[in-house]
Image (tube, rainbow, N blue to C red):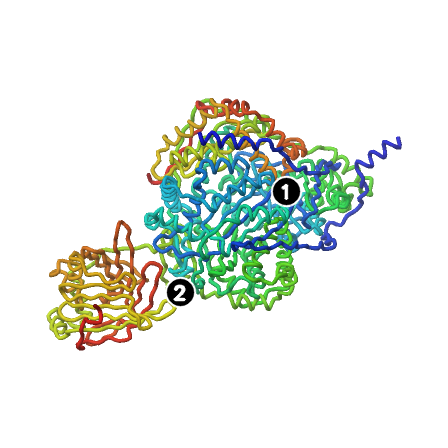
Amino acid sequence: MKQLFCIGVLALFTGNAFSQSKVDYVEYDLPNGLHVILHQEKSTPIVAVSILYHVGSKNEKVGRTGFAHFFEHLLFEGSQNIERGEYDKLVEGNGGTLNANTSNDRTFYYEILPSNQLELGLWLESERLLHAKVEKIGIETQRSVVKEEKRQRVDNQPYASFITETFKRMFVDHPYNWVPIGSMEDLDAAQEEDYVNFYRTYYVPSNATLSIAGDLDIEQTKKWIDKYFASIPAGQAINLVRDYENLSDADFKSTYGADKSVLDGQDYVNPKSAEAKKLLNKYAAMPTSIVRPPNYTGKLTSVIADTVYDNIQLPGLFITYNFPNQTDPDFYALEMMNEILSGGSSSRLNKSIVEKKELAVNAFSFPYGLEAGGIGIFGAIASGEADLTVLLAAIDEEISRMQTELVSQEEFEKIRNKMENDLITMNSSVAGIAENLADNHVYYGSAARTNTMLAGYLKVSREDIMRVAKKYLTPDARLLLYYLPKGN
Amino acid sequence: MKKLIYITLAFFPFVSWGQIDRSLIPSAAEAPTINIKDSEVFKTKNGITVILSENHKIPKVSFQLSMGNDPIPEGPKAGIAGLMGEMVMSGTSNKSKDQLDNETDYIGARLSAGSSSMYLSVMTKYLDKGLGLMSDVLMNANFPESEFDRLVKQYESGLKSAKSDPGQMASNADAKVNYDATHPYSEVMTEESLKSIKLEDVKQLYKFLYVPEGSYLVIVGDITHADAEKVVDQYFGSWTGGKVYKGRPLSSKPANGKNVAFVAKPGAVQSVINVSLPMNIEPGDPDQIGLSVMYQVFGGNGFGTRLMQNLREDKAYTYGCYARPDIDEHGSLATISGNFRNAVSDSAITQIIYEIEKITTELGTEEELETTKAAMAGSFARSLENPQTIARFALNIEKYGLDKDYYKNYLKKLAAVDKNEVLRLAKKYMSAENMNIVVVGNEEVLPKLAKFDSDGKILKLDAYGNAVIEKKAADVSADQLIEKHVLAVTQTTSLKKAKKKLKKISSYERIVDFTSAQIPFPLKMIDVWIKPNMEGNKMEAQGMVFQSSYFNGVAGSSTNMQTGKKDMTAEEIKAKLKTVGIIPEMNYKLTGMQYDLQGIEVVDGKDMYVLHTNDGASDRFDYFDKTSFMKMRTVIVETEDGESSTSELTFMDYTSQGGLMNPGKINLAAGPMVLEGNVSSYKVNEKLTLEAFK
């Protein structure tokens, strides 16, 4: 009875209005296809400059896994105008910080600078886009560094291989079969032509989104963007310029049928000579083409069970289902379902498996939404003596409850509050806002989604949550990965 | 037509960019001014210092409460504070844990607790609800038994999984090598210490540590000053408690030479390497900003530091290698850490030492220093984006008594640090000769590490940082060992001669003067023995007897200042008879003592025989040097009501006195207490009585 009363009290809070503070922004395309998003936020004198390249591990070939991420490391090596090792120094020495990350679908570079160094950030990113330069010594060094990164993050960490093992089994005959870190052998196999082709295909303005947020003046920023980015030619003309800078006179001539000297090496968009104009226009009109892997349509049709032996002490269990793409309308409901199951101390998996039944030291789940596919992973690390089959049965019990009982109104309100809180937190830093705007533009076709995400969650009904639980958490088609200590 | 052109122009407003010279690095615009808003500080009647940093950027408020306690020594219950902190969230006298979790999640809040802290982050619209939960937990946590049992089980699993987590293993080892055994930072929970923690201990500790006196409440976010005062009074005003805990002054342990500690992680493909340099510096020291510049040059954030340039960008030994000075009022140290593949683990240490050598002997370049200072100024500016930073500044000013304008003047002070200052600070706080090197990794890297240790002896630790005991089979029997020991003590060549020599000794008296970091005055211990089996012992300080005991061969008693006098029980008398005598080992056969030789153990790099005895009351482990056969160490394990306590005696500086070999120094360690003793007097065949010990 006391319990019931409390729930009634909780429900009183539902009268509160949900709110999402609006992120204002300006966006436009340059003639060369580069998409630009600007957000002004003056509370701290800093600015985040980012470029999202729409290339990730799913654009890699079999035998070259890990290449997109490796390439990301190489693009810090320098450019025609920036000596090896200077890129970092220019940012850090001017009070900024920089980094990048590579996912299955994208490569994201950013600098966070004092706001008076915005022009520097734009120059640096434009250099990386137009004519990055990588020397042999840089390649060899970064190859080893990336291998150390893999050892540190995956090979030497307990359970850390589960993502690799899961993707391998969930995505067959598709580049999601491997994960961004790739394999050591493939990193060793990379050849000169791989670097050249990758850069020429994916590092072009029409495949990039420049997203800037922070203490900036919109008009001044647009002027600088024109100076550094609009001066980068469109289409295949960018590769013509790269060849102009790298090829010998003879090789250039045999490729383009023109002498190098027709270009002045300065202005690639409005050159003075008519011959240069003609050549550049011809190549600018040739589009760069990117063949994107199709959506993954394969689905598990039965239960696959496998065991991985790892350097661990406690056994672990990972259960994976096919989910839709992240852009599927069902994804909002799946994320909310996930929060009910594993978000916070009061979540169902924590309460039942960790606290009541004491079968696991922790239990978690997350929807892994990707651009061309998706999976949902459930997992638990068993407590000392627990049996994995008992643990599996306990997780299944919670999943089946999700599919057969409507979520209570109170629990539903709780999740809606949680989503609101998460969205407020997401937009609390300028770097976070720049990334969020770029992601929404690239994956969802509109930066405007940044301001409509909360509405997306609020549209989900309790019935939707039960429906997606039934539709996607299929007991007869899923992957069961058992992790057991080596030597047992 | 005109209109159309206009639209096109608007669309591409700056079509004519003309030529640009890309080789020119853009110059900076005018530097922005950095404003640090003052935080507001006020005190409550019950002793809380409130620091408020208003910021209305997002509709959230956070409350960080930290109690003013010093770190508390946990002794045999190591890890209890962490367990207590976690259990605080297990329910209150008003709400079960389920209700508490549910109501917290319901409002999308975060509420957490530690052994001396609590944190709440909540959307402004649920401020009251969130604070209601926080203050309920703060004052009414009720520690249900079922939750205690559950958490203990979770911790058992957690301790198990720590054995496969290299980062955790390294930090446990760091705790042991950088602090004395009596320092709370050296305490690491083990399976045994977890077992000895009882629910009652946890409840008491909560009462002891959760007190308002000397606490700080930092409020950040979307709230006005007036509202802050109101809610503080409403939700924290009725909080009461005892005195805040203040312990003795603490510090890290200075490194003496280069010491390598190795923790084996089977199957490791990389070594986690932590090189620690303990320092003597307190928060707010005038050297602090310069020291942080020196460490940023050396191995701070980013890719441009000396460690990153050498170990990553030049040698590709690692994904990242960083150095971080940790300036703490209870003990400071700097740690250089990274993950390195097995084949280059030793080369990485060589390079780290090379870089320490270099920065402590050579001036850096002007360019490097300017770049570093610019990076630090930028990082300072970026950190201001987070409103928590401003509040942290105010907290530090309050807590460490810093100058009011310490952070406002930070950039000025940063700019003033020059090359000579960096070199001076490197020389003062770093040394290429003194450091603690912890390596967690595959056994295959071990042979290459001895060269880094000053005495070539690597300390091997387990996953919790405790010394790994390596035992070998003994090459003598227990009785042979005892015989050799008797000959060594008596400096004779046969048992017969030894007995003859001992026969002439009818009594002895030994006085040991003890000092301890934990006790402000010296202690004196007096031991006497009178033929054949009478004994007396007392401990006194400043003329006062704290405790004494006596035994006349048939009966005895012990007296303690606090608990009074107690006669020995029949069992105690039986046990006593087994250990009495100048060399009690000689009589083990006669007295019925249980004894067995457990093997040879390496202690402090020396082989020692370990003789285990049980007199019916306690287990003893006596360690005899394998070459001299002298007793070097005794470990006594007593078990009472299922709880065991360990005390340890170490014997050093043996010399011949009264015809027998006797130690010149005796150290005594019991729980967190360590006493260091000098034998000031040793007399034989004096006329003695036991009167003074009754």
Give, as a three-letter code, the residue at label 2.
Ser
Location of residue B242 in the rendering, given as x and y in whole percent from the top left corner: 44, 55
Q: Can residue A89 be seen in this view?
A: no
Q: Are marks 2 and 1 in contact (CB under 8 Å)?
A: no
The residue singled out by tag 1 in the image is B58
**Same chain, marks 2 and 1?**
yes
The residue singled out by tag 2 in the image is B454
CA–CA distance in space, label 2 to label 1: 55 Å
Q: In this view, does B424 lie to the left or right of B480?
A: right
Give, as a three-letter code, the residue at label 1.
Ile
Under tag 2, what secondary structure? loop
Under tag 1, what secondary structure? loop
Q: Quadrant of the C terminus of chain B?
A: bottom left
Dot 2 alpha-carbon crowd within 10 angstroms: few under 14, some 14 to 19, many 20 or more = some
Q: In which quarter of the image is the N terminus of chain B?
A: top right
Label count reads 2
Location of residue B171 in the rendering, given as x and y in whole percent from the top left corner: 43, 53
Q: Can residue A21 be seen in this view?
A: yes
Q: In this view, does B607 lie above or below A178?
A: below
Location of residue B286 in the rendering, given as x and y in whole percent from the top left corner: 57, 66
Counting residues from the N terminus, which is met first, the one under dot 2 or under dot 1? 1
Q: In this view, does A143 lie to the left or right of A206?
A: left
Location of residue B154 in the rendering, given as x and y in whole percent from the top left corner: 38, 41
Q: Is residue B629 left or right of residue B296?
A: left
Residue depicted at 53% across the width and 46% down the height? B235
Dot 1 alpha-carbon crowd within 10 angstroms: few under 14, some 14 to 19, many 20 or more = some
Q: In this view, does B383 lie to the left or right of A158?
A: right
The image quadrant of residue A208 is top right
